[in-house]
Image (cartoon, rainbow, N blue to C red):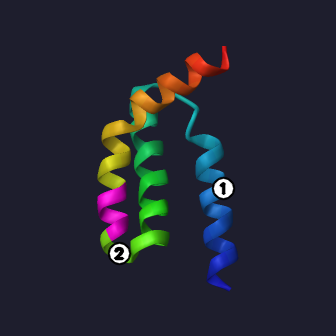
Amino acid sequence: MRLPILASVLATVLMLAACGNTVEQRIGGAAVGAGTGAVVAGPVGAVVGGAAGAVTGPSVARATRRATR
């Protein structure tokens, strides 16, 4: 029951991660990183993934925007 809910939340976060400016990019990156970290390594992975996503979110968003132009 929890896996479909988690998968739908993760899919929504991934779709919204490319929207917005720097603040939203950091929030989106943190959410994606935390979701991925939680799936891979549990609660500790969620914390580490969230921190890594917040730090690298803007640079990843800029790189993906350049690649799609």
Location of the C terminus by quadrant is: top right
The reply, left or right, for residue 6 in relation to residue 37 is: right
Q: Quadrant of the N terminus?
A: bottom right
Taking the magenta stretch, the answer to whether it contains residue 51 is no
The secondary structure making up most of the magenta span is helix
Q: Which residue is mark 1?
A: 11
Q: CA distance from mark 2 to mark 1?
A: 19 Å
Q: Residue at x 70, y 75 (%)?
A: 4
Q: Which mark is residue 40?
A: none
Q: Quadrant of residue 50?
A: bottom left
Residue 19: x, y in percent? 58, 32
Residue occupying image coordinates x 39% and y 32% = 23
Counting residues from the start of the chain, the first of labels 2 and 1 encountered is: 1
Against 15, is 7 above or below? below
Mark 1, other Cα within 10 Å: few <14 / some 14–19 / many ≥20: some
Residue identified by numbered label 2: 43
The verdict on residue 46 being magenta is yes
- 43 and 64: which one is in front? 64
Task: Name the residue located 44 percent from the left edge and 44 percent from the top edge.
Answer: 29
Disc 2 residue type (three-letter) = Pro
Q: Which stretch is magenta? A: 45-49
Residue 58 image position (x, y, % from top left): 41, 30
**Image location (x, y in percent) of residue 38:** 44, 69
Question: Label 2: how many residues lie within 10 Å, few (<14), some (14-19) or many (20+)?
Answer: some
Kind of residue indicated by mark 1? Ala
Looking at the rendered structure, the secondary structure element under dot 2 is helix
Q: Quadrant of residue 37?
A: bottom left
At horizontal 41% and vertical 37% (from top left) the residue drawn is: 57
